[in-house]
């Protein structure tokens, strides 16, 4: 995998909101939402239930709030990542790892704290989960970037996967 921003990332004119190619922009939005929510849930289960000791009820409440938040922030996060990678990417694998880790941590940690607070987590649970989140951000940022880029390639190669379908 290249350390630079992949060629299949969103073009600046699309990201800027030119209004052109609305179906493609909807596919990009859907892809970002699917990527953010699926990755977030897979990572949150061990952090919240095992390490932080949250109850299933707390975990489900936090995760349901996370679906709402992740859906709202998926596209801005992707645009932020594209912007940072465009400015600071392209200097090797280690550099890509550091940039993706920075992007992930700087964007996600404040939102994660707010989500846990609104979900009813105690201060001790929030501190434990946040400290854990910061410690493993190095293990999350680059994998999420790779996962997002992989989904983009899959959807780009098979756009029918993201086409809206009539239920009738």
Image (cartoon, rainbow, N blue to C red):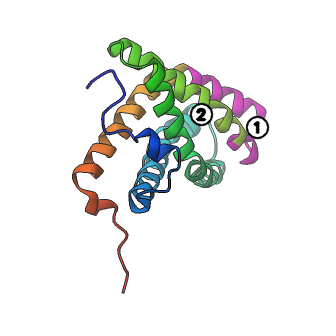
Vertical relation: 140 (above or below) 67: above
Picture quarter with the N terminus: top left
User: Does residue 126 show up magenta in the picture?
Assistant: yes
Q: Who's the residue at 56% across and 40% down the image?
A: 49
Q: Is residue 19 visible?
A: yes
Q: Where does the image place residue 85, in percent across and percent down from the top left? A: 44, 25
Corner quadrant of residue 80? top right
Q: Give the range drawn in magenta.
A: 115-134
Residue pointed to by mark 1:
122
Q: In this view, does 29 lie to the left or right of 133?
A: left
Looking at the image, is mark 2 or mark 1 earlier in the sequence?
Answer: 2
Q: Is residue 42 visible?
A: no
Vertical relation: 117 (above or below) 94: below
Q: Where does the image place residue 7, in percent across and percent down from the top left? A: 30, 34
Q: Nearer the viewer, residue 109 or 55?
A: 109
Vertical relation: 9 (above or below) 140: below
Is label 1 in a helix, a strand or a loop?
A: loop
Mark 2, other Cα within 10 Å: few <14 / some 14–19 / many ≥20: some
Picture quarter with the C terminus: bottom left
Residue pointed to by mark 2:
108
Q: Who's the residue at 55% across and 19% down the image?
A: 135
Mark 1, other Cα within 10 Å: few <14 / some 14–19 / many ≥20: few
Is label 2 in a helix, a strand or a loop?
A: helix
């Amino acid at each position: 995998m290249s350390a630079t921003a992949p060629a299949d990332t969103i073009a600046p004119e699309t990201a800027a909101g030119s209004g052109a190619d609305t179906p493609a922009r909807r596919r990009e939005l859907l892809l970002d939402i699917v990527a953010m929510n699926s990755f977030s849930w897979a990572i949150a289960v061990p952090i919240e239930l095992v390490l932080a000791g949250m109850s299933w009820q707390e975990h489900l409440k936090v995760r349901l709030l996370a679906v709402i938040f992740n859906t709202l922030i998926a596209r801005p996060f992707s645009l932020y990542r594209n912007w940072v990678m465009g400015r600071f990417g392209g200097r090797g694998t280690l550099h890509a790892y550091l940039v993706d880790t920075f992007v992930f941590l700087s964007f996600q940690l404040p939102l994660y704290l707010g989500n846990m607070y609104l979900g009813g987590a105690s201060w001790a649970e929030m501190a434990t989960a946040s400290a854990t989140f910061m410690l493993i951000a190095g293990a999350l940022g680059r994998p999420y970037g790779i996962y997002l880029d992989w989904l983009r390639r899959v959807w780009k190669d098979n756009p029918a996967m993201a086409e809206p379908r009539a239920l009738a």
